[in-house]
Amino acid sequence: MIRVTHLRKEYGSVTPLKDINTEIKKGEVISIIGPSGTGKSTFLRCLNLLETPTGGEIVIDGERITDKACKIHLVRRKMGMVFQGFHLFSHMTMIENIMAGPVDLLHRPRREAYERGMELLRMVGLADKAQAFADELSGGQKQRAAIARTLSMEPEIILFDEPTSALDPTMVGEVLAVIRSLAGQGMTMLIVTHEMKFARDVSTRIFYMDQGEIYEDGTPEQIFEHPRRERTKQFIQRLKVFTASIDSRDFDFIGMNSRIEEYGRRHLIPQKIIYRFQEIFEELCVQILLPLLPEEVSVQMTAAYSQEQSCMQLKVQYNGPAFDPVDSDNTTALALVRHASVKMEYLGYSGAEGTNTVVLEIEE
Amino acid sequence: MNRVIKKYCIHIALCWLAVLLSVFLTPGLSVRAVETVNNGAEPEASEASGQAQPEYGSLDELTGKKIGMITGFDTVLKGSLGHDNTFVYYPTTTDAIIALQKDRVDTVCVDEPVARLAVSANEGLCIMPETVAEAEYGIVFPKNSPFLASFDSVIKQFWEDGTIEALEKKWMDGDEEGKVLIPRDWEGKSGTVRYYHDATYNPMCYIGKGGESAGYDLDLVLMAARELDLKVEMTVCDYDALVPAIQSGKADIASGCMDITEEKKQYVDFSEPYCRSAVVLLTRDKNAVKSTESFGARLQQSFYSTFIEEKRWRMILDGLGITVLISVLSGIFGLLMGFGICMLRRMKPKPARLGAAAYIRLVQGMPIVVFLMILFYVIFGSVDISGIVVAVIGFSINFSAYTSEMMRNGLETVEKGQSEAAFALGYTRYQTFWKIVFPQAAMRFLPVLKGEFISMVKMTSVVGYVAVQDLTKASDIIRSRTMDAFFPLIATAVIYFMVANLMTGILTCAERRIDPKRRKREVKGVEPQ
């Protein structure tokens, strides 16, 4: 249905897409994952020519859209797109947003477009918002309406460009539910997403993109459980494990705390464990260790959460002379650390550089 | 809708209140000015009442004083006065006389016939006995005009056969009834002259009964033309624009009680003098007594002389029509041109963008009066084109420069994502612009545009400079005729206010119509179920 060969995109000095080659069949649901800035969105936007490729060829349903002569607006009618920022037409009500395409482009009678539009709104659970304007809706509602608008053109393919990234965490679920139901109906879809669990559940195929190319292409099982290539492995590993390093006394304390919170949210870790993790980070790393360390500070934190045991393993490594936190003079901080963790063990001092290692366990 | 109407009523009521207050305050001011003068006077002055006593008796007393005038008198005055006077220039003699009454200037320099009329129509003014200079008025011709010699010989003949004397009698002394131009009943086989004249210089050139042009100057030119068998096309024009009209070739001859000076002769030619008079100074009369007429009666009198007498309301109405015509046409063309400029500004090729930007800079950087005069007297100088057309062209260009920037800003506020969403649905660039981007931009730029349009309506009051008789010009003409300083001004202000308000109302309605949030929430073409 879609064939991409040697697709390339350059902007001046940067090259977000180096060489993309792939073939997509009807009915496939493909999630595109990968680190930020590796061209996932650019790839998607090239597929409907919102970005003009610098080189290569894209063929959709036998039509070579990279040709100058191609009437791209006709191709776009059968290839919908859902944006991160919703982009609902703000001068129209929801039902008008949904009727606009069929009436203006497919020349459907208004009555018919209206009925079909209401049906779509019911499907995404927004029938009561038909007469609302975009600024009267929540983010999740806007995105569901935008999906309904895309569906109104009866597309054969839908491109989702990070559909939940701009949403409040509480609203991600409602949007994913709608996309999930579409996947169930056999729609061909390409989804750029950071929601790994969703990607894994809903997709028939995963593209792992890295450094401007499809680095690994496989089933969700393969990519998430048995990634074959090095960078994929690292990426999947990083997803599950939280790592952070402090290399200056003036590091971003608030930023670190919010990273911990986000990690917790992504992996559905109980809030209590996250609080304790944050407490240990503050008392152990900031209060006890940082003042003792030499000028060239180096603290590494690695955390991993086990769903089965609902328990978090935390490893803290730091430089300087051999030092067991139990010997700290800061008794208050130490007491708090002991209170937050069920176990704290000093594994000793090792290596030529001299590294201390402490392991902690946190339970709910 | 009811709320809107109510809001408007309150709005209009408030404004009327302000207007009425100003009407009440203005006579108060003028009375105070007269009283101050009275206080300074000697007690015996009251015994000599009925006898005018100029505030300044001789030219020597004027050292360091402020002298009001229309352009052209300064050269004459410099000859007879010292050099430490401040000259204040006014667009019409009437304005200068108002300034004198309001103590803004100490004396006003005018031609004698005008001075006499001003004294008879205004309380508290008199003519200084000492004249400034002798003055000779001539008809203005462009350099090397074929008409000059023939007019000269006719004027010479008029001096000899007593025609001039008869004219003076007819226009300066005689009763009002006789003050009509000679009938234009000759064939005019020898050609046509285009004659531009001022109309704010009673009794030399003004608008008389029923809105007909009248005056000594006009009568003389017509008589000379009859003698030469020439057809005359008459055009009313601002005094300051008479010489430009001649120089640019718009007019073959011009007059407006213009005195012959060496300075002017460098640029234009003058005929033999057709009237010998004097330049005099008007001053306040120390013996003036406060009017005993009630305020109401004075207001009534002013109303009568401004609107009813000689059917002057017709002139006001015609002027109003011209003002509205110019405003509306300029609004429409300006909007269309502005849209074009805005599109050029948004185009990819650099020359188009730079060209449009330069156009906007150029137009915005020029005062509209200067721009209009350049258009009329320079660019269309040799084309036979109506001042109204030039005004519409000028204001359209001016309006387009402003609206294009407003539209551009409006278009830029529509986020790019919405265009992308439309493209992704399959809209073409054209459809995206008209269906998605423009309606939203219009919502945002219309309120600003409304303000700009209203300010343009008011700006059209300068079209008198390109020989168009609009509302302001009509009121100037009436003021010069009645020598009533205030009432026509305030009446004009009220009319402008009403026009501006009406237009604001219409545009506000349009604005509401396109604001999607304000209209009924129902789907067009689909009956509610």
Image (cartoon, coloured by chain):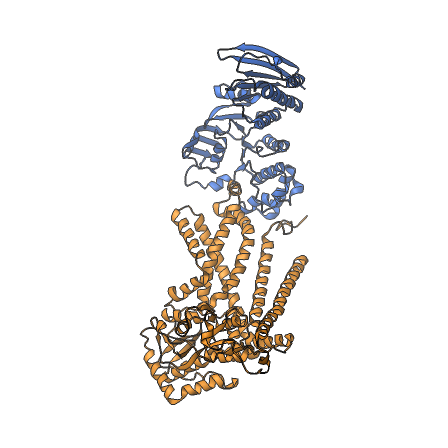
Chain colours: A blue, B orange
Q: Position of residue B484 (x, y in %)?
A: 55, 75
> Viewed as shown, does residue B350 lie left or right of A282?
left
In this orientation, does residue A229 appear? no
Number of marks in the image? 0
Image vertical order of residue B289 relative to residue A161, above or below: below
- Seen at 53% across and 63% down, the residue is B458
Q: Is residue B9 left or right of residue B467?
A: right
Furthest residue toward bottom: B161
Is B417 in front, or is A49? B417
Q: Can residue B188 be seen by looking at this rendering?
A: yes
Is A92 on the left or on the right of A51, as rendered? right
Residue drawn at x 53%, y 15% is A320
Residue B2 sits in which quadrant? bottom right
Image quarter where the C terminus of chain A lies is top right
| Residue B268 locus on image (x, y percent) | 35, 72
**Closest to the observer, B98 or B103:** B103
- Relative side of B521 to A192, left or right: right
The picture places residue B137, in percent across and down from the top left corner, at: 40, 78
Residues B465 and A190: in front is B465
- Across and down, in percent, residue A214 comes to 47, 26
**Up-down: is B495 above or below B358?**
below
Q: Is residue B22 above or below residue B289?
A: above
